[in-house]
Image (cartoon, rainbow, N blue to C red):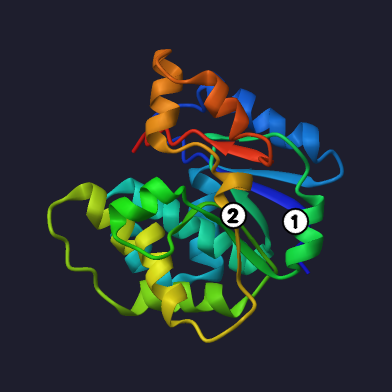
Amino acid sequence: MIPKIIHQVWEGRENSLPEFYTQLSETWKEHHRSWQYELWNSDRMDALVEEHFPGFAETYFGYRYPVQRWDAIRYLILFKMGGMYVDCDYECLESFDNSIAEQRTCFFAMEPDEHRRAFGKNICFNNALMATSPGHPFFACIIEHLSAIPFPYSGDKFHDVLASTGPLMLTSLYEKYNGSDVRILPADQVSPWSKREVRNFVAGTADEEQLEKKLEKAIAIHYFSGGW
């Protein structure tokens, strides 16, 4: 079973958690009052790697981009403790209690179709919202992959991050995974707006009636801030 723990990561080596993200974090606490909440800073992140994943330390501390550490640590946290990881630019609209009960062992959040088409994929999910029981075999596959295969950097930071530690890497592993114990929550529930639609909403140029309609089934909204 998936433990009722919410994990968020803010390394904080250079700056503190912005107020907007703090407000979004509160929405998760508000809708999950009986859940444990864990905010991971750099000290906690480093200690987890050094204590429980010493064989991964060279890879972890050797990443070219900080965001790769932020990606990797969430897999390690969930493998060790279980629970639900949520990016700081995610807003919660409703409790995930039903999703946890229905999915039981592991789930991820589907990307909007617009993103999937841009990547040329039949399926594409993210690592911004995901949940699992401790020690799940798919997360073991993720950690083994990150540990064993040196990544050939191309110089394109966006692609390199997504393909080395992010959604493209996850999707590729999922396509090869033999288990049936991984579920993908539909985008209309967990990623109802695309990055383009979020950008238009912030700029005040969106069709707000259309965007409101897209929230009919939503239990969370990803704002795709891309601060890395």
Q: Is residue 12 left or right of residue 227?
A: right
Which residue corresponds to the image point at 35% horizontal and 62% vertical from the top-left?
Answer: 168
Camera-nearest residue between 223 and 27: 223
- Front: mark 1 or 2: 2
Position above or below: 95 against 185: above
Q: Which residue is mark 1?
A: 99
Instruction: Give the mark, 1 or 2, whose residue is nearer the N terminus.
Output: 1
Image spot of residue 99 (x, y percent): 75, 56
- Tag of residue 186: 2
Image spot of residue 50 (x, y percent): 49, 64
Position above or below: 188 against 93: below
Q: Is residue 60 left or right of residue 27?
A: left
Which residue corresponds to the image point at 79% horizontal and 36% vertical from the top-left?
Answer: 31
Observer able to see residue 139: yes
Camera-nearest residue between 188 and 106: 188
The residue furthest left is: 155
Q: Quadrant of the C terminus?
A: top left
- Tag of residue 109: none
